[in-house]
Structures are given as structure tokens and as C-alpha cells.
Amino acid sequence: MTAKVALIMGSKSDWETMRPATEIMSELGVEHHVEVVSAHRTPDKLMEFASQAIGRGFEVIIAGAGGAAHLPGMVAAKTRLPVLGVPVQSKALNGVDSLLSIAQMPKGIAVGTLAIGSAGAFNAGLMACQILALSDAELASRLEAFRAKQTQDVLDNPDPRNT
Ligand code: RP5
């Protein structure tokens, strides 16, 4: 099966933040490709990746980056595929720089921006699954089951003193 989701990130240092995206996609049975593509260190690779993404069979791109986080916006500028941007927590500004860089796209090129850090990465993976589930009934069923279990887990153990 070919990967329908490409998960790219600006640096290997982003991997621990971005890993939860792969975990939920694996849990829901969604094939994904993972690769470092840097907007400022490998700009030619970035353009090549984005312009070839549709031809490679990808349907959703998740892009994580930190600091002056150009990666999601630049990828979105070169492909019509939906791009989900994950702000990686930076050392200097705790990821607020990453968040604003990704969220504040000028009108005309859209990037869906998730929360800062690993929760955002997990939700990007989840959102990618939800997008693919629009045309995949089996994936939709797995998503429904995931959500039902999450709900039931809370209902079954409402005492906050129990872990
Ligand atoms: C960004 O610069 C990356 O996305 C990373 O979050 C940040 C720092 O990268 P490294 O200097 O750790 O490689 O491009």
C-alpha cells in the first residue's frame, strides 16, 4: 500500500515532538511517509518535494517546524494538497514564534494550524485520518471506534484520584 500521508519536519530535532502523529496514524492503519525537509537548509528539496507530492500519491501533508517556521506555508504554496502545520516548541519563545509563523498565513494559501507541540502533532495525525476517512469507510469505522473508546475510558473512571 502506498503512503497517503507525508509527514515532514524541519529537523531531526523535531522528531520527538512529531512522533505522536505517526503513532495515531499507525493505530488507525494509515500508511505514512516520514522525512526531514528543511525550508532554510534544503530549500531546493522542499520545492521538489512539494511539487511532486500529488504525483507520489500523497493526499495530506503534515509539516512540523519550529522558530521562524516557514515549512508548512512554503509547502502549501507549491501544492494544492491540504497541509496541516504543527508548531514545534522552540527554546527561545516556547513555540509561540512557531505558532504565529504557521497560523498567520496571508490570504490565498491555506495551512491548517494545530496546537504547539506533541498534542498538535497527535491531532495532525488524527485530522489526516479524518480527511482520508471521507473516502474510506473502513477507516471511518476505526475512527468511530477510537473516539467511542476514548469516551468510554473517561466515563468508566471518573474519579480524578484514580489513574
Ligand atoms: C527548524 O528549526 C526546525 O523545524 C526546528 O524546529 C528548528 C531547530 O532546528 P535544529 O537547529 O535543531 O536543527 O527548522
Image: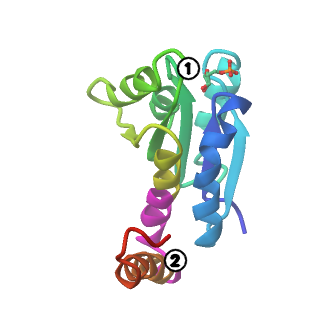
x 55%, y 29%: residue: 65
x 67%, y 42%: residue: 16
Q: Which residues are magenta?
A: 126-138
Disc 2, SS: helix
Residue at the spot of label 2: 139
Question: Which of 68 and 8 lies nearest the eye of the viewer?
Answer: 68
Question: Which of 118 and 123 lies nearest the eye of the viewer?
Answer: 118
Q: Quadrant of residue 23?
A: bottom right
Residue 49 drawn above or below residue 130? above
x 70%, y 30%: residue: 13
- 129 sits left or right of 99 in the view: right
Residue at the spot of label 1: 91
The residue carrying pointer 2 sits among few (fewer than 14), some (14 to 19) or many (20 or more) residues within 10 Å by Cα, namely some
Residue 36 drawn above or below residue 55? above
User: Measured from the top left, where is residue 81 in percent x and y?
Assistant: 47, 46
Dot 2 or dot 1, earlier in sequence: 1
User: Measured from the top left, where is residue 77 in percent x and y?
Assistant: 45, 29
x 36%, y 24%: residue: 100
User: Measured from the top left, where is residue 59 in percent x and y?
Assistant: 53, 55
User: Measured from the top left, where is residue 69 in percent x and y?
Assistant: 50, 23
Quadrant of picture, ligand 1: top right
Kind of residue at disc 1? Lys
Question: Which of 82 and 127 lies nearest the eye of the viewer?
Answer: 127
Quadrant containing the N terminus in the rendered view = bottom right
Q: Which mark is residue 14?
A: none
Q: Is residue 128 one of those drawn in magenta?
A: yes
- 150 sits left or right of 110 in the view: right
